Amino acid sequence: MKTSARGRSGLYFVSPVADASVIGGASVVAYLLMWSFQDRIPMDSVYAASAALLVAVNWPHFSATVYRLYHSRANVRQYPLTAIAIPFVLLGGVWASFAEPDAVAPYFVKLYLIWSPYHFSGQTLGITLLYARRANVRFSKAERFAIAAFIYGTFLLPTIAFETGRTGSDYYGVVYPALGLPVWTRQVAEVWLAGCAVALVFIVLRWKRDGKALPPAIILLPALTQFVWFVLGSRLRAFNEFVPMFHSLQYLFIAWALQLKEKLDVESITPSRRYVAWETVRWLLLNIVGGMLLFETLPLLFEMTGYPTAFVTGIIFSAVQVHHFFVDGVIWKLKSPTVSSPLMVNLSELAGAPANVPNVPAQGIR
């Protein structure tokens, strides 16, 4: 690991407390509280809060991805396969699911359900590398592999654990099967995750032994957070209801900073608090409306096919989210200054205060 000095203002998008809370700290605290009081948590209140947060946080994060790709003709021209072809491929999957609700729909849903935690892992790794870049920390190949292996290990363990079952489950009434993997695959996943955790501890101890400065805690916070989400919190039903929201909040936080800086640069706007406030409100309202169009209006249109509401909801929700995974795989890797520069920005710079933030090419996040 190599480090170089950088001011605190350059490390955080907003502040140490704000960044740490959104990137994972708030979800870890929420887990500890729910674990401590799990026998006294009213699940009706949990479901009501979760439903409200779908509209306010979860759905807007999908809309932010759509906006990020389609608001610029240059983006569409650069990625025509993702922007134009993939929607038609997914429409084909929706049509096939409606035509063969027993043969195709379960596997269409299963594609989304397996890809989703993998997508979470990609975002977690991306945020880790992004904060490392902002801190001017450069991991060796072995260190980066250990971090990535641990993050993806937290996804593999619960996924394989489910797939060793025989009964499957259902998503909005669409019953999908488990793969029926042998039990030993779960044991291998447990050993792998434990080994990766030991490797990370060994790396930290080696840093201390060699007298190296430890990286800022926020760099390793995303990995710890995902371990809480997928492993420690996997059996806490109340907490599981909010994990997608915490993931979406991470995403919106990074996308918000990118949006503010990109628009400021493209339209040559003078940085100011007024600009930050009005653009934040405009962008959030736009994505709240966009999220409602994706997850409320779009299913209503497909209900005209005559299929049950729950079935239509499951298929359309799956299609929208798989589209999100495809798009998200490219929009954070656009090789242009309007992407690399915003990922190094901080709020004080956007509000008009001078900041010493180098223009360093950014790692893509997913």
Image: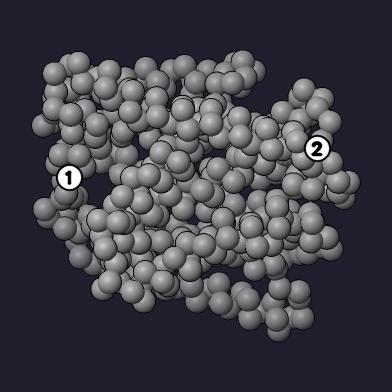
Q: Is residue 296 above or below residue 210?
A: above
What colour-coding does the image apply? one colour
Residue 303 falls in image quadrant: top left
Query: Which residue is identified by label 2?
Result: 272
**Residue 360, visible in the rendered structure:** no
Tag 2 secondary structure: loop
**Residue 111, visible in the rendered structure:** yes
Q: Earlier in the sequence, mark 1 or mark 2?
A: 1
Instruction: Give how far across and how far down residue 27 sits, in percent.
Output: 47, 62
* Residue type (three-letter) at the residue carrying disc 1: Asp
Query: Which residue is identified by label 1?
Result: 170
Task: Name the residue rendered at 55%, 43% in the picture.
Answer: 252
Instruction: Give how far across and how far down residue 333 sits, in percent.
Output: 62, 35
Q: How many marks?
A: 2
Of 243 and 329, nearer the camera is 243
Residue 155 falls in image quadrant: bottom left
Task: Name the residue rendered at 58%, 60% in the picture.
Answer: 21
* Residue type (three-letter) at the residue carrying disc 2: Ser
Q: Using a 10 Å C-alpha cutoff, classify the residue at mark 1 as few (fewer than 14 neighbours), some (14 to 19) or many (20 or more).
A: some
Of 209 and 232, nearer the camera is 232
Nearer the observer: mark 1 or 2; the answer is 2
Instruction: Give how far across and how far down residue 139 sits, in percent.
Output: 68, 61
Q: Which mark is residue 343?
A: none
